[in-house]
Amino acid sequence: MGEILAAGLAAISNAGAEELQTMERAILERRRELGLWEMGEGSSPSQVLEGKPYGDGWLQLEKRIYERKDGSVSVRGPYWYFRYHEGGRQRKLYLGKTEEPEAELEKKLRRGSGRGGG
């Protein structure tokens, strides 16, 4: 293992949440500089952090990755989504930033948003 990699892994294991987020942004930017990551070319614009089955679908926590006009990368979120199938197609319902995605989903379903309701 090279010195740079060993130092990086040691830094990751000792980093707090804010430092990890800064490192993640720096890694994404470096990958972009090296041509290893391009928006819309085989890379998903999101990173799945957590997923769990719920009802007839799947609750998924994602960080969203955006490329700014100046070429730098912005990581936003995390946001909850509910993925399900309807009419033979996969659908995705945005739930937002919440500590209780199940309750937020039920609230949206009662209001009629998503699932063909508007």
Image (spheres, rainbow, N blue to C red):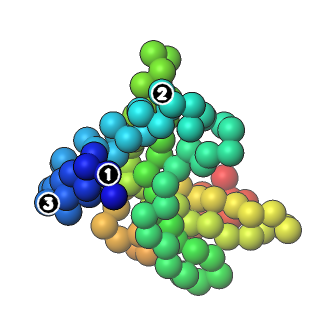
Under mark 1, the amino acid is: Gly
Q: In the image, residue 21 lies at what x, y percent?
A: 27, 47
| Mark identifier at residue 14 | 3
Residue toward you, 58 or 72: 72
Q: CA distance from mark 2 to mark 1?
A: 21 Å
Name the residue located 48 percent from the left edge and 21 percent from the top edge: 71
* Furthest residue in direction front, as rendered: 2
Amino acid type for the residue under numbered disc 3: Asn
User: Does 112 appear above or below 32?
Assistant: below
Q: Residues within 10 Å of mark 3 (few under 14, many from 20)?
A: few
Pick the front one: 35 or 117: 35
Task: Tell which circle, 2 or 1, labels the residue nearer the N-terminal end.
Answer: 1
Q: Residue at x 67, y 70 (%)?
A: 84
Query: Cβ–Cβ below 8 Å for labels 2 and 3?
Result: no
Q: Which mark, residue 2? A: 1
Give percent across and percent down for residue 111.
54, 62
Q: CA distance from mark 3 to mark 1?
A: 19 Å
Residue most toward the top?
Answer: 70
The disc placed on residue 33 is 2
Residue ranking furthest to the right: 88
